[in-house]
Amino acid sequence: IVMPKISSYSTTAPALTDKLIGTDANDNSATKNFTVGDVLGLSQGLVLDSFNTVAQPIADTSTPQQVIFGSAVSNDSVSLAADGSITFLKAGRYIIESRFNGGRITSGSGAIFNVFYASKLNGTQIGNTIEDSISVTSNVSGFFDTTMNTFVLSVDSNDVLTFEFKSAFGSAGLGVSSTSGFSDIPSSVIRINKV
């Protein structure tokens, strides 16, 4: 039987149950069918979801400090260190979602202040600095505003991603917000999806 060239077949929009033909490397290179849904299921999706439930006060108003995202954790795609450094173990494209709950940690006089955030890949800033302006009245503590940032990042194996924050206001930092009826808002959150 002689089959026509593949280019002579008509094309159509694929469905998840449509079949593709391929080689099974784990079965002596046998030719097998795979569904489109099975192939899509191989994409990794969420590879890191971590957050910090501890306040991160400004240690030095003149020096940026690294954001900590919770306990160290590792899988076959990324490794999160206790200091907040994220090492990519697999090269590729990732969607990075970060949230920072910045504001005033300790009480004092009324103030308007800024909290700044930056992302760094291998120690070099990527993207723009993010600024959050916060206004608090006298004797208010634990007042925070959540800043979110999402971006796509292409990395090589062993690239390291870090996040930093700073403020010239000594009572500032990343804090935890509590609300009755809901879980606490963490001081920082990191979610990474591999695409």
Image (cartoon, grey):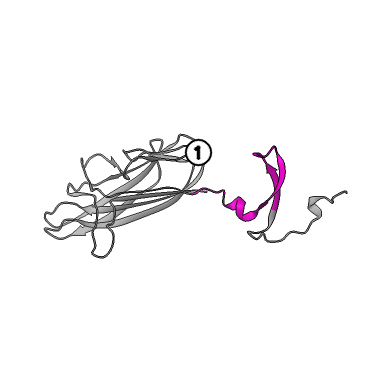
Furthest-right residue in view?
1
Q: Indicate yes or no whether the magenta region holds residue 43.
A: yes
Amino acid at circle 1? Lys
Left or right side of 25 for 46: left
The residue carrying mark 1 is 90
Query: Residue lying furthest front in this view?
Result: 27
Instruction: Tell me where residue 143 sits by quadrant.
Output: bottom left
Coordinates of residue 44 in the picture (x, y in percent): 51, 48
Say if residue 161 shows up in the picture.
no
Judging depth in this view, the residue of 114 and 190 nearest the camera is 190
What secondary structure is found at the residue carrying circle 1?
A: loop
User: In this orientation, does residue 115 appear?
Assistant: yes
Task: Examine the rendered structure and indicate whether residue 6 appears above or below residue 80.
Answer: below
Numbered-mark total:
1
Give the residue at x 24% y 57%.
177
Instruction: Please report the residue visible at 32 percent of the width from the left and 47 percent of the height from the top.
Output: 117
Q: Residues within 10 Å of mark 1 (few under 14, many from 20)?
A: some
> Which residue occupies the foreground of this view, 39 or 136?
39
Magenta includes 97?
Answer: no
Quadrant housing residue 28: top right
Could you tell me residue 90's position as x and y percent?
50, 38
**Which residue is outermost to the bottom?**
181
Give the residue displayed 24% in from the left and 53% down from the top.
176
Residue 56, position as x, y percentages in the image: 24, 46
User: Magenta region: which residues?
Assistant: 20-45
The x and y percentages for residue 122 are 41, 35
The residue positioned 65% from the left and 61% from the top of the image is 15
